[in-house]
Image (cartoon, rainbow, N blue to C red):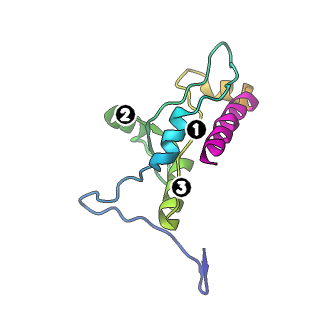
Amino acid sequence: MRTEEGPEIWKIHINSDFSIAYFDADEKLKSLALSAKPDFKEIDGRFTKVIEGRIATADEYATEFHRWISQFNVNVEAEGGAVAQVCYKLGRPFVIIRANTLEEGAFEALKKHASKVSGNSTLLVSEITDLLD
């Protein structure tokens, strides 16, 4: 958003009691994503599945990401946190949909199969949208 003085800087202040330490996805959107049954395409003999999980994020690379993953059982990525923060500030519902793999060479595999992975994500978003109507 822009103000007369320029762009508005949004910050989420986390209190010492951690009262704003996370953003909850919208329950309806989350439920729709988890119940959707799109016709996912097979990728290297594997089928996409929808799972529920927590995402941790930071505004810069944190060397603590590996500790966060094991200690808090989270996935780590950057964009979902930004989406959650903007939705929180605007009072809009959200759910984060992301592709994930924990395999060695995951980045190379993602590059190789980017169109199939993004196609599967599109199928899921389309089904959620259809279920909202």
At 55% from the left edge and 21% from the top edge, which residue is drawn? 103
Image spot of residue 58 (x, y percent) = 46, 51
Image spot of residue 54 (x, y percent) = 42, 40
Q: What residue type is labelled 1?
A: Arg
Say whether residue 57 is visible.
no
Could you tell me how far apart the alpha carbons at marks 3 and 1 are, in whole angstroms? 14 Å
Could you tell me how far apart the alpha carbons at marks 3 and 2 are, in whole angstroms? 20 Å
Image spot of residue 26 (x, y percent) = 47, 50
Q: Are marks 2 and 1 in contact (CB under 8 Å)?
A: no
Q: Image check: 53 left or right of 8?
A: left
Please name whichever residue, 112 or 28, is drawn nearer the observer in this view of the structure. 28
User: Which residue is the site of mark 1?
Assistant: 98
Image spot of residue 84 (x, y percent) = 50, 54
In the image, which is nearer the foreground, mark 3 or mark 1? Answer: 1
At 68% from the left edge and 19% from the top edge, which residue is drawn? 43
At 52% from the left edge and 72% from the top edge, which residue is drawn? 9
Does the magenta segment cover residue 116? Answer: yes
User: Which residue is the site of mark 3?
Assistant: 82
Could you tell me how far apart the alpha carbons at marks 2 and 1 are, in whole angstroms? 16 Å
Please name whichever residue, 95 or 63, is drawn nearer the observer in this view of the structure. 95
Q: Is residue 129 above or below residue 66?
A: below
Magenta stretch in the rendered image: 115-133
Q: Earlier in the sequence, mark 3 or mark 2?
A: 2
Q: Going by the picture, which residue comes out furthest to the front?
A: 133
